Amino acid sequence: MERKDFETWLDNISVTFLSLTDLQKNETLDHLISLSGAVQLRHLSNNLETLLKRDFLKLLPLELSFYLLKWLDPQALLTCCLVSKQWNKVISACTEVWQTACKNLGWQIDDSVQDALHWKKVYLKAILRMKQLEDHEAFETSSLIGHSARVYALYYKDGLLCTGSDDLSAKLWDVSTGQCIYGIQTHTCAAVKFDEQKLVTGSFDNTVACWEWSSGARTQHFRGHTGAVFSVDYNDELDILVSGSADFTVKVWALSAGTCLNTLTGHTEWVTKVVLQKCKVKSLLHSPGDYILLSADKYEIKFREINCKCLKTLSVSEDRSICLQPRLHFDGKYIVCSSALGLYQWDFASYDILRVIKIPEIANLALLGFGDVFALLFDNRYLYIMDLRTESLISRWPLPEYRKSKRGSSFLAGEPGMNLPTITLTAFCASSSRPWCMSHLPFSAGK
C-alpha cells in the first residue's frame, strides 16, 4: 500500500476506532494482537512500558519529588531505594526525610549537618542497634582487675572509671582498654568523684577527703559527719563541696579551704545522694543558670539554693509507705526516681509529676540511667532497656554472677545520653574486687 493510501486508511480506521465502545475497542485490540508477529509484539511491549510506567521521580522537579517522599515512612523509602539507581540517588539526597526519621528515633539533630547520606546512615545504624537490643545481642562484658578487696564506689566520666575499694585504694581506669591509669592509697571509699587533677572521696570513716592524682597526696580532709558519707559532689567554679551522710545531714564545705560552711538538717533517714546541678528551666523559685543542691533519702528528695534555702521537698507518698530507690536522675530539667510502684518523673519547673511508668511484669526495678528515648534499669538478675516512648522493656541482659554485700551492690550507668544509638552505653557494677562493665557492641562504621 502506498504511503498516501496508508495514511488515508489509517485516518478512517482511527475515526471508526474512536466511535467504538470500550468493550469494542478491547476486542479490536485483542484481534490485532492475535494477528501480530514477533516484530509487532516487541514494538508494542517497548512502547507500553514508556506509556504506562511513568517514572515520576525522574520526570518531576527535585523539589516536588522531595515533597512526595516526605509522606512515606522510612521502611517504605528503603524499599523504594531498591527500585533503581535513580530512585536510590533521589531518595538518599533528601536531607529532611532522613533527619525526620532520625528525630523519630530520638536522635538529637544537628542542623549544621546537611549531608542527607549521613542521616540515612545514622538511621540505618539506629535500626541495627534496635534489632541488636531486641535480639539480646547488643552487649559485651569485661572485668577490670586490680583491687584486692571489695569495690564499693564508682564514678564514670569521659571514658574513665574511678573505683574506690575496701583495700584502702582508689584507681582510675581507661574503660576502652581496661588499663589502670592511676592508683593511690586512700581510706575506705563509699563515694568517689574526680576530674583531671583531683579525686574527692566520701568514706565509711565519716570523713571526706581530696586527693591529688599525680602525687597521691591528700590535699584536704573534711571532718564533721558522725556517720558514713554515702555521696559527694563539688563545683570548682563555686569552690563548694557537698556531702550526704548516714547522720541524716548534708554538709556544705569550702572546697579549697576544707572548712564547713553549713550543716543542713531536715532529713530523717540516711542521705544517699547529693547533687550540685545548674538549673535549665525557669520557675517562680529559680532561673536558668542557678545552681541547685539536691539531696535525697529513703522517702524524700529536697531541693535547696546554694545559700541553703529549701525550695521544695518531693515524695511519692505522704505517709511514707513507699520507699524511693537511692539512685536517681537529675539533669536540671527533670527529676526521675524509681520506687516499688515504678518510675516517677517530675518537672523541675513546676515540681509536678509528669508521669509514672509502671512495670507490672517485674517488681522493684532500680534506675541506672534515664535519657530522652531509653531508660536503663536493673534487678538482681538482669540489666533492662526500656523504650520510654512505649514504656515497655525491649531488651534484657543477664548480670554476671556476684556476691551480695550487706551494704548492697553499687551500679552506675556509664553514658546517660542513651538516646544516641552510636554512643556506647556502659553499665558498671562494683560488688567484688573485680568491677565489671557491660557495653554496647560498637558499630563497624563510624558515626
Image (tube, rainbow, N blue to C red):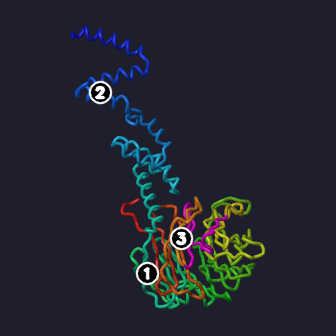
Residue 360 falls inside the magenta stretch? yes
Which sits in the foreground, 11 or 67?
11
Residue type, numbered disc 1: Ser
Q: Quadrant of residue 308?
A: bottom right
Q: Position of residue 431 (x, y in %)?
A: 52, 84
**Residue at the spot of label 2:** 44
Disc 2 on helix, strand or loop? helix
Q: Position of residue 365 (x, y in %)?
A: 60, 73
Which sits in the foreground, 360 or 209?
360
**Residue at the spot of label 3:** 384
Q: Position of residue 132 (x, y in %)?
A: 44, 64
Disc 1 on helix, strand or loop? strand
Does residue 381 appear left or right of residue 274 in this picture?
A: left
Q: Quadrant of residue 17?
A: top left
Dot in front, 1 or 2: 2
Q: Dot 1, crowdedness within 10 Å: few (<14), some or many (≥20)?
A: some
Q: Dot 3, crowdedness within 10 Å: few (<14), some or many (≥20)?
A: many
1 or 2: tag closer to the N-terminus: 2
Callout 1–callout 3 Cβ contact below 8 Å: no
Q: Magenta stretch? A: 356-380
